[in-house]
Structures are given as structure tokens and as C-alpha cells.
Image (spheres, grey):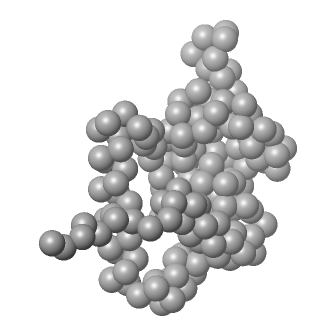
Amino acid sequence: MDAIARPQGCTNFRLRRLMRQLARHYDAEVAKSGLKTTQYSLLSHVLHLGPLRPVDLAQAMGIEASTLTRNLKPMVAAGWLTQSDGPDARSRLIAITDEGRKKRTEAQRHWRTAQEKLNEMLGVERVIALHTLVDESMELLQATGDATGYGEFDE
């Protein structure tokens, strides 16, 4: 009788280890623009979705409101994002500035370089397979209520 193949080791540990390595790869390249990858992501989300309320931005990015507030402060101070009054007295709107658009475009060139290097290192077929596996896994986890999906904007 054939033994059923079972995963060896902790899936969480393996994925976190891979994510740390990938994050270092992208961080090193995007840092050449003067941004962190989290800042690039924030600019990208506001560019594509904004102007929008901080609560909606946090939800779209899959982060806590307090994390977003911390991340917004230096971006507003740098003049890349603005916070203005929303439709009522209690709400605010986050929008990207012209300087923010320029900074995102600069960072995007570095992000693309990181992506192209990763495609070369792993092979395009493996990267496509990885994307497919991750997307399918997220769908399955979301269907069972075990994961929160959020949008991303690369390009």
C-alpha cells in the first residue's frame, strides 16, 4: 500500500521565510527611490482608489487603522499625500499629490526592476506558478473564512 504524501515541516514557517527573503529583495531595490515598499504600496493604493477615507484605505490594504495612521504621517509630511475634510465633519479623505505621483512613478521603476530580477532568478514559469498557487490558496482560505483578501497594485 502506498503511503500518502504529507507536507513535512510547518507551512507557516516556510511561507514566512520565503516572504522575508522576497521582502528583502524588493526592499533593497525600491529603497533606491527613497521609499520603503510599504510606502510604495500606500501611494499605489491611494493613486488607484483615492481620494478615500482612511478606514477604507486600511481595509483595502488589509492593515489596522493604527498602522495606517503611523504610515500616513511621514507621507503627508513629505508632501506625497494629503488629508482633507471629508463629506461630513467626522471624516477625512486621503489623496495623492503631484509630488506623490512622481515619487510613486520613480519607485515603480525600481519595483519593476525587482520583479524582473526575481523573474530571472526563479524563472518566469515558476513565478507564474507561484502566483497561481498563492491566488488559489487565498480563494480557498477566504471561502472558509480563514483569510482576509485585499487588493494590491503593482504596476
Residue 88: name its quadrant.
top right
Query: Which residue is painted at 82% across and 46% down in the image?
Result: 74
Q: Position of residue 137 (x, y in %)?
A: 34, 54
**Which image quadrant: the N terminus?**
bottom left
Residue 2 versus residue 119: which sits nearer the camera?
Answer: 2
Query: Which residue is painted at 63% across and 72% down in the image?
Result: 21
Horizontal relation, residue 149 to residue 10: left or right: left
Residue 35: name its quadrant.
bottom right
Query: Which residue is painted at 48% across and 90% down in the image?
Result: 120
* Residue found at the far front of this picture: 1
Horizontal relation, residue 53 to residue 81: left or right: left
Residue 13 versus residue 5: which sits nearer the camera?
Answer: 5
Q: Position of residue 6 (x, y in %)?
A: 34, 65
Inspect this view and state whether residue 106 appears: no
Up-down: is 14 above or below 140? below
* Residue found at the far top of this picture: 89
Up-down: is 59 above or below 30? above
Label tally:
0
Horizontal relation, residue 47 to residue 65: left or right: left
Q: Position of residue 8 (x, y in %)?
A: 44, 67
Up-down: is 59 above or below 154? above
Residue 115 versus residue 130: which sits nearer the camera?
Answer: 130
Inspect this view and state whether residue 91 appears: yes
Q: Position of residue 52 (x, y in %)?
A: 55, 32
Query: Which residue is painted at 32% across and 36% down in the image?
Result: 144
Residue 83 versus residue 17: which sits nearer the camera?
Answer: 17
